[in-house]
Image (cartoon, grey):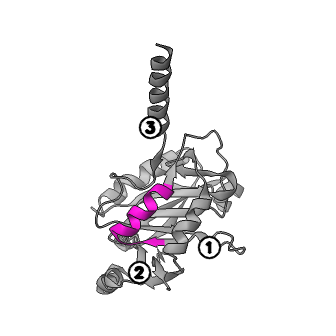
Amino acid sequence: MIKQILLTATVILSNFATAQVTSMINEKNVDASTKVYGMAPLSDATKAYEKFNFILENSAAIQFAKPLLEYGYQSSNFQAQENGLMIYMVKDKKIIDQWLVNPVFYNTFHDGTPYSYDADKLALIAEKYPLIYKEEKRQYKNEKEYQKQRQALFSDPYNLIVTEPDFTYEGYFEVQFPQNEQFKNPEAAMAYLKPLVDKLTKKKYDINYSLSEKNILDRTQFTMTIAGEENIYKKIKLDHLQKGDWQSLSYEASIFRKEN
């Protein structure tokens, strides 16, 4: 009877322990078309974790790495390193999931939650599937120029991850309001601007008040920023208000490229 109880307890504990261990690579974030990359930050002058960089681009490599990327219990250690290593799950050159590994603290973060993890296991992956990479930043004048080059970016096998430019807004300009009975606060200024902008565009725009140096130091006014298409700037009528110059936004693509 005692032996049976001990056996049952052992099975329960074994199942519990197994349930607490899972891999960063799982059916939710990896399928036949997914790539997995381990990348130490290029900004780290010490290059302490470059030795852990790895590249997994086929099922054999991913299956080899899966048990080595198993993490343990949820940790109470919320410490993280500035030079921690990122593990990216990538599909069509876009990040679909990511983990931050902190070798010094023996933990890994996912969606803000820390779990125990021994980063020394990364050396085994990197030894078999090493990666050398660099980051390139490319500037574009507008979306049309970018679209002409987009296919080449995504078809280049050396481009591992492509972060595309954000073309939501063409640029921005500022409008200065005096603080008075009509405009007592930034909310009143925003309420004044919104219907004017609504009449001029159907595209997405943004009106905001930030704690800029000007707004902090000069409390006699509110400077609002309007971001959107240039047509808003050209057509908006602002009686007795100071309108700043139009500022075009630069559009930048960030590319992680394989060098080995």
| Residue located beneath label 1 in the image | 50
Q: How far apart are labels 1 and 3 at the CA level? A: 32 Å
Quadrant of res 200 = bottom left
Q: Secondary structure at mark 3?
A: helix
**Res 236 visible:** no
Badge 1 density bin: few <14, some 14–19, many ≥20, Cα 10 Å: many
- Which mark lies nearer to you, 3 or 2? 3
Q: Is residue 42 above or below residue 24?
A: below
Q: Main secondary structure of the magenta part?
A: helix
Nearest the viewer among 72 and 115 is: 72
Amino acid type, callout 1: Glu
CB within 8 Å, label 1 to label 3: no
Mark 2 Cα-neighbour bin, 10 Å: few <14, some 14–19, many ≥20 = many
Q: Quadrant of residue 197?
A: bottom left
Q: In the rendered structure, which amino acid carries the disc numbered 2?
A: Asn
Q: Tell me if label 3 and label 2 are in contact, CB under 8 Å.
A: no
Q: Disc number at residue 159?
A: 2
On the rendered structure, is 81 left or right of 202?
Answer: right
Picture coordinates of residue 150 (x, y %)? 32, 82
Residues under numbered marks 2 and 1 in contact, where contact means CB atoms less than 8 Å apart: no
- Identify residue for label 3: 19
Q: Distance between the Cα atoms at labels 2 and 1?
A: 19 Å
**Numbered circle sitting on residue 101:** none
